[in-house]
Image (cartoon, rainbow, N blue to C red):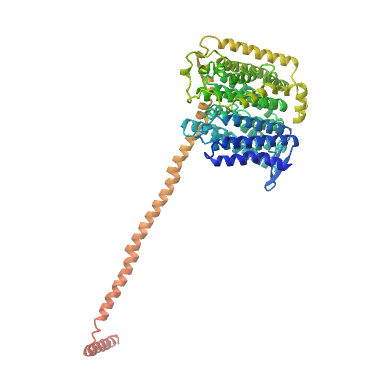
């Protein structure tokens, strides 16, 4: 059985690595190979979901890299693999022949493979590794068109924001070791000793909220819209953004082990669902609207995790994955065809391209939470879990559901308007449109739209009981009939008001401070730059000055002192020691010259010198005596 699990992660990771290294060569074969690897991965995911394999390998002393497919992982691996297949089939017709398809399809498979490792990891080490690979590949995919500086900058912002939050997982791992969890198994984290338990929980929550673009980290998701549309479809549905929500759903026992984590996470999700829903309402760019709605919809999953609703959050995650991937593929098809994603320019787009229009409309109405579509039922499951925790949480969640209907219907209103007679000048604002839909668009778009519409069956009594049994969450509450009716009425009323508001003359002309703040994503990025980036850069500058003037200054002064000492030693050596040596040598030479003078070679001179020497010697003797 373990071989099947290794195959499940080896297929996308190995195939993605090979395709990424292939580069632009064999460009016509790359899409087919990428889709084939994704289909094989889907087959392995289905088999793994049925057989529940486990695998482990020694990593460090006393630690293992553990992988397993349990109930929650079974749902996730199938969801991730299915969405990956659909997105890659769509992407096969989206890129020109001269573009580096090998790098794109390879990175997409690596991205999906990292998510598969994330959802099957049973210990922190493989989770951390996959978490890092997911962040790195998302950076490369968001900045896929890296020759355009603003896209590269957007990738950097997204990467650095999530990377800062990811440090929480390292903090959690260190605290787990200190707290006596030597194996670093995820199911053992709730049993850590205090106060390390609280440190572990805080690290996990920070990493999860950052990855899932919850407040205050949401702004990176706006920047991620600079990537290709297939990247957005995968990133916003079953990978990356969903990873944080999955981690919280996986670690609900850890949240329950502390008194503060569950309510804190629940309120973070509820507030994000409401605030980012309002941000979505203010957007005039369709991809930005969907991006803000992703943060808002993930907020419902986070709300479910904080309220102990594992099955409810899982239902929301699966239904949202199908819905949001279909919506992003539809927007990507329009962007390729018309060269724009601005809502005013997309008036009539659904009528110009009916198949895409039908798919987008169904997906948007599902996102609005209208009955009987899937997210209506899924949200009620989440709200039922929230109501057991707090009436205030339920009220905020219900308000967020109403806002979801507003931004979804707003998008539908624009794209279903009659096609303007002078639509052309509004096109080609982002790129030159092809004025056609790629041949690879219909199949994945329709499949995802159908899934988005019908996955609400998971909230029906029979399937809901089966899902709770699969996830081991039999005690979770189900929505009461009055809750179903109330949420349906609220969604329908909000949708009707949104349609009426959008039908007013110049509905996009609204302005004001609140609208500007919402359109600017609550100025979260500017706040992060002011509160975090500038102080960090200021501290870095101060440390650089300290290093330059104090540390480097001390080094330079030491060097100057060494040079001065060397100069003094040189002068002492030249003027003292060397001078003395030279004086001795000169004296020896002088004595040598004087000693050579008597050596004339004449015998009579030697006799005279001997006589003189004897005379001197006699004189000395006489004087001494």
Left/right of residue 94 with respect to residue 316 in the rendered view: left
Give the quarter of the figure containing the N terminus: top right
Say above or below: 239 vs 23.
Answer: above
Vertical side of 64 occupied by 304: above or below:
above
In the image, residue 603 lies at what x, y percent? Answer: 23, 90
Q: Position of residue 73 (x, y in %)?
A: 70, 34
**Quadrant of res 179:** top right
Q: Quadrant of residue 64?
A: top right
Towards the viewer: 195 or 84 = 84
Residue 346's place in the image compared with 538, above or below, is above
Q: Can residue 175 be spotted in the picture?
A: no
Left or right of 85, for residue 95: left
In front of the other: 158 or 560? 158
Q: Nearer the viewer, residue 147 or 424?
A: 424
Residue plotted at (37% across, 54% down): 564
Q: Where residue 535 sits: x, y (%)?
A: 50, 32
Visible in this render: residue 359? yes
Q: Is residue 457 left or right of residue 86?
A: right
Residue 483 in picture, x, y percent from top left: 72, 16
Seen in the image, is 530 located left or right of residue 175? Answer: left
Q: Quadrant of residue 521?
A: top right
In the rendered image, which quarter contains the C terminus?
bottom left
Number of callouts: 0
């Amino acid at each position: 059985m373990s071989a099947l699990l290794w195959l499940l992660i080896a297929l996308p990771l190995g195939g993605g690595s090979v395709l990424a290294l292939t580069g632009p060569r064999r460009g016509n074969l790359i899409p087919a190979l990428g889709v084939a690897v994704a289909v094989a991965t889907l087959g392995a995911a289905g088999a793994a979901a049925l057989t529940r394999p486990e695998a482990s390998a020694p990593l460090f002393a006393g630690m293992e890299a553990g992988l397993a497919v349990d109930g929650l992982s079974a749902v996730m691996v199938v969801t991730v693999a299915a969405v990956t297949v659909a997105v890659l089939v769509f992407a096969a017709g989206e890129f020109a022949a001269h573009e580096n398809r090998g790098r794109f399809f390879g990175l997409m498979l690596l991205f999906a493979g990292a998510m598969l490792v994330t959802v099957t990891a049973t210990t922190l080490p493989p989770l951390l590794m996959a978490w890092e690979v997911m962040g790195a590949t998302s950076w490369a995919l968001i900045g896929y068109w890296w020759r355009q500086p603003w896209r590269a900058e957007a990738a950097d912002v997204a990467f650095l924001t999530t990377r800062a939050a990811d440090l929480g997982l390292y903090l959690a791992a260190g605290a787990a070791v200190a707290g006596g969890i030597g194996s670093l198994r995820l199911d053992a984290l709730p049993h850590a000793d205090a106060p390390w338990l609280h440190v572990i929980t805080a690290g996990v929550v920070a990493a999860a909220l950052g990855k899932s673009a919850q407040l205050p980290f949401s702004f990176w998701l706006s920047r991620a819209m600079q990537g290709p549309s297939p990247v957005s479809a995968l990133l916003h549905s079953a990978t990356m953004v969903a990873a944080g929500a999955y981690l919280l759903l996986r670690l609900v026992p850890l949240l329950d082990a502390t008194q503060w984590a569950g309510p804190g996470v629940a309120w973070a999700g509820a507030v994000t669902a409401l605030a980012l829903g309002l941000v979505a309402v203010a957007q005039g760019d369709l991809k930005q609207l969907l991006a803000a709605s992703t943060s808002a919809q993930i907020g419902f999953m986070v709300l479910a995790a904080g309220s102990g609703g594992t099955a409810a959050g899982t239902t929301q995650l699966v239904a949202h994955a199908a819905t949001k991937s279909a919506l992003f593929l539809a927007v990507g098809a329009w962007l390729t065809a018309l060269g724009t994603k601005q809502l005013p320019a997309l008036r009539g787009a659904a009528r110009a391209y009916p198949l895409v229009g039908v798919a987008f409309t169904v997906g948007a109405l599902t996102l609005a939470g209208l009955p009987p579509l899937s997210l209506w039922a899924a949200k009620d499951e989440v709200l039922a879990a929230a109501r057991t925790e707090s009436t205030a949480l339920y009220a905020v969640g219900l308000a967020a559901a109403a806002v979801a209907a507003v931004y979804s219907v707003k998008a539908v209103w624009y794209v279903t308007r009659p096609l303007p007679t002078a639509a052309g000048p509004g096109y080609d604002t982002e790129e030159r449109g092809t004025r056609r839909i790629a041949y690879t668009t219909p199949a994945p778009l329709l499949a995802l739209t159908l899934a988005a519409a019908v996955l609400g069956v998971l909230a029906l009594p029979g399937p809901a009981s089966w899902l709770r049994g699969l996830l081991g969450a039999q005690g979770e509450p189900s929505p009461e009939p009055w809750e179903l009716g109330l949420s349906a009425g609220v969604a329908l009323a909000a949708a009707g008001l949104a349609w009426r508001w959008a039908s007013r003359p110049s509905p996009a002309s609204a302005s004001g401070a609140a609208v500007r703040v919402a359109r600017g994503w609550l100025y979260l990025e500017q706040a992060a730059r002011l509160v975090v980036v500038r102080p960090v850069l200021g501290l870095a500058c101060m440390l650089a000055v300290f290093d330059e003037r104090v540390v480097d200054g001390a080094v330079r002064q030491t060097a100057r002192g060494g040079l001065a000492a060397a100069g003094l030693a040189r002068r002492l050596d030249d003027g003292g020691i060397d001078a003395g040596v030279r004086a001795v040598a000169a004296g020896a030479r002088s004595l040598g010259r004087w000693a050579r003078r008597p050596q004339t070679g004449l015998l009579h001179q030697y006799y005279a010198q001997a006589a003189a020497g004897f005379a001197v010697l006699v004189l000395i003797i006489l004087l001494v005596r």
